[in-house]
Amino acid sequence: AQSVTQPDIHITVSEGASLELRCNYSYGATPYLFWYVQSPGQGLQLLLKYFSGDTLVQGIKGFEAEFKRSQSSFNLRKPSVHWSDAAEYFCAVDGNKLVFGAGTILRVKS
Amino acid sequence: EAQVTQNPRYLITVTGKKLTVTCSQNMNHEYMSWYRQDPGLGLRQIYYSMNVEVTDKGDVPEGYKVSRKEKRNFPLILESPSPNQTSLYFCASSPGRAGELFFGEGSRLTVL
């Protein structure tokens, strides 16, 4: 069975600092991989996705993620965080079905 | 504007009183799905539909029903709500099963 783990429930970073949110998955092959963001009171919005090819993918709002097959990971990164990035971030994995991680809440301190 | 619309956005009801949460998308998407979001559990799929008249159970279907009579609409029905169905519900649609999901803004349901 496939699964996805986001090890960090909460992360706090200072505005302007770099960010990395971790995502690990378990699946027998390479799945489709996604990162979604949920702002307070809103639905989820797709940040980026990986299907195949280049393992470093660029998304919206200055985010990027790197697929590492050897580590079964798909970590989300941003070089410089803005206060408006405060939200909850979900990693999702689609092998034979789409499964979401439990989410990581990002707090940005000024 | 491309969107997924859910109604109602907020609802407080009592145990056993049937309710329906509507979902409509204007993107001509084949695939639609319902999720519930609970703290610490992420999003769990309730039901999904690959196309009109085709629906299937997700991970947590107990206590819910759906129908897909038209491509654009995918209502979620709680025949006899119970307090453990208090949750935040999201409808989503996609051009295909593995494509990008477009989410509605959510419906917060409280069952007393």
Image (cartoon, helix red, strand yellow):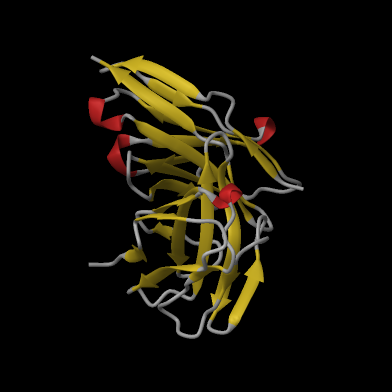
Instruction: Count how many numbered circles sit on residues in the image.
Output: 0
In this rendering, the answer to whether A14 lies above or below A27 is above
The residue that appears at 28% across and 39% down in the rendered structure is A61
Quadrant assignment, res B15: bottom right
Where does the image place residue B70, in percent across and percent down from the top left?
45, 84
Quick one: A56 or A59, which is closer to the camera? A59
Residue A55 visible somewhere in the drawing: no
Where does the image place residue B90, in percent across and percent down from the top left?
45, 56
In this rendering, the answer to whether A17 lies above or below A78 is above
Quick one: A80 or A68, which is closer to the camera? A80
The residue that appears at 55% across and 61% down in the rendered structure is B98
Is residue A85 found left or right of B73 in the rendered image?
left
Quick one: A88 or A74, which is closer to the camera? A88
Where does the image place residue B96, in percent across and percent down from the top left?
51, 69
Where does the image place residue B71, in percent across and percent down from the top left?
45, 81
Is residue A4 found left or right of B78 in the rendered image?
right
Quadrant assignment, res A81: top left
The residue that appears at 52% across and 65% down in the rendered structure is B17
In this rendering, the answer to whether A80 lies above or below B31 is above
In this rendering, the answer to whether A63 lies above or below A33 is above
Q: Quadrant of the C terminus of chain A?
A: top left
Quick one: A17 or A86, which is closer to the camera? A86
Residue A86 visible somewhere in the drawing: yes
